[in-house]
Amino acid sequence: MAMATQIAREYDSHIIGLYIIPSAIVYAAPYGYGGPINFVEMNRFYRSKASSVEDDFEDFIRKENLNGEWRLVNSLGTFVGDGVIKHAREADLVILGNDNSIQDSIEFESRLVTEIGRPVLIVPNTTRSDFSFKKVIVGWDGSREAARAAFDAVPLLQMSEKTEVTCFNAHKEREMSGDLPGSELTNSLARYNINVEMVSEKTKTSVSQALVDRAETGDLLVIGAFGHSRLRENILGGVTQKALKQMPCPVLMSN
Amino acid sequence: MKTILASLAHLERVDEVLEAAIYIARENDGHVIGYYPIPGPMRIVYTAPGADFPLDDHITLLYEKKLPEIKAKFEERMQRSGVEYEWREEKRFEPLFTKSILEHGREADLIILGHDAPGSKTAKEEVGFVADVVMGAGRPVLVVPPAGKSDFKINKIAIGWNASRESCRAAFDSLPLLEKASDVMLAWINPEKKLGKNENLPGAELAAALARHDVPVTVKGIKNRTSTAKAMINMVEEHDIDLLVMGAYGHSRLREQILGGVTEHILKNLPCPVLLGN
């Protein structure tokens, strides 16, 4: 919520608090795995929490004097994400909390990011409420996804004091040519009055590690989410996965 | 939309592409890049034993010959319009334009492509090329048909919406244009197919989201028994639409991009300029 407030203040926006209750569908449990009880429990748990979360949300909106709306949805499937996707496609930005200790959470996020078609801002549970975007790191490799993310992030970049377009090992990327990768991107961003700087470096460690290390110096990391859809399961690329696992700062992802 | 990449690779559509680029740049205080790629020679496939691999360079030569003429036209028109501009010519190695336009387009807000007249012989290859650019760019692509009777303008916009990822992309990508339009129609063709009969306000949430950006939006559900593509073309003609915004659906089959039926049909018939998002 702290993050939503920052952005909403800047852009006079409308916050939708979306709370989804997963349904108590009874799954066929072939190996006796978990059994149907789990899902009923989950449904009950979310249901019992709903009103207290709603109160918190309403309090917050009132206290901060923002425009907001509470949406309570009973989802038809056990996957909460389907509900998020449906509502999020009609919004400018999606904000999610992240608990990086849970592998499930990464799968959930990867599926959301690749299917929503909107930028998703993932906030780690360590982010403090007095947070602000001072320095933003944009990961650039000349790809379609990176282009999406960079331009989707423009309103947030305009809030920042400084933006760094960061490119590692440009000479290895197939999709880029020229001596100064991303220099055109920095020009395009600068036309939005963003204080932007190009950083092109070589690294001997993996690109994902280098980018995560770099992100530790910033307040927001903007990256494209690479997904390979393997049957219905979405598998994220290495950089995306690493950023989500280590979560050095909030991450804006787009696909 | 501050940075507009106007692809001048379609030599017969230079005027139309520039007109669209100037219009949008004026509305958004933007910067137009006139991009003129010179394709590399085509290597002809092995023909007979012992034969060489000859290079077919007539296209390269044509683009080199046309360069001064197009550059002069570009500079003259841009100077007259008073829009900030930049000329970019580039000699490429590969004979196809896709890669060069992707490389430059990914670093711009909008890509403008010229398109063949409906029913022309090369329309099919052209559709494939547009598909490659739209799928690969990650940026919105405006496809401009041959000039009609009236000047290029964007007052009435229709958004083809069906709650999919792609149409959502297109709708939000076109926001800078929607904000300046006088009339925006959010059209959903046969919504009951996807939603079921119970939901009676398809796209209401999107309309609310757009209205928060001060877009003058109206929602319209259209029932149609013929194909979705035909219904969209009818809608464009009936309501005198200046710009159609829609998602481009594609499947990548190996490296070749294949468009969904609706997108392909629209591109083949191109009733008005179309903004595609993916």
Image (cartoon, coloured by chain):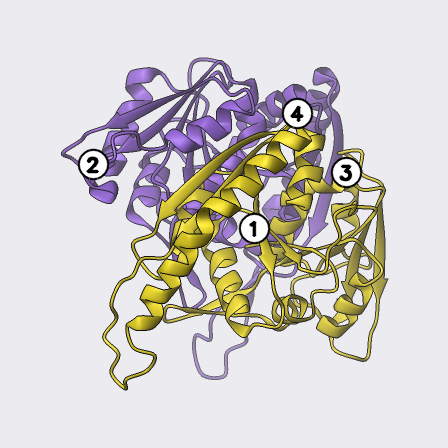
Chain colours: A yellow, B purple
Q: Amino acid at mark 4?
A: Ala
Image vertical order of residue A45 relative to residue B243, above or below: below
Residue B227 horizontal/vertical position (percent): 20, 38
Mark 2, other Cα within 10 Å: few <14 / some 14–19 / many ≥20: few
Residue of label 2: B198
User: Circle 4 — which element?
Assistant: helix
What amino acid does circle 3 point to?
Met
Helix, strand or loop at mark 1: helix
Pair 3/4: label in front: 3
Residue placed most toward the observer, B132 or B200: B200
How far apart are the alpha carbons under marks 1 and 3? Answer: 26 Å
Asked whether the residues under marks 1 and 3 belong to the same chain, the reply is no
Is the residue under label 3 in contact with that under label 1 (CB below 8 Å)? no
Mark 2 residue type: Asn
**1 or 3: mark nearer the eye:** 3
- Which residue is tagged 1? B137
Q: In the rendered image, which residue does mark 4 sit on?
A: B25
Q: Are marks 2 and 1 on the same chain?
A: yes
- Is residue A79 shown to the viewer in this render? no
Q: CA distance from mark 4 to mark 2?
A: 43 Å
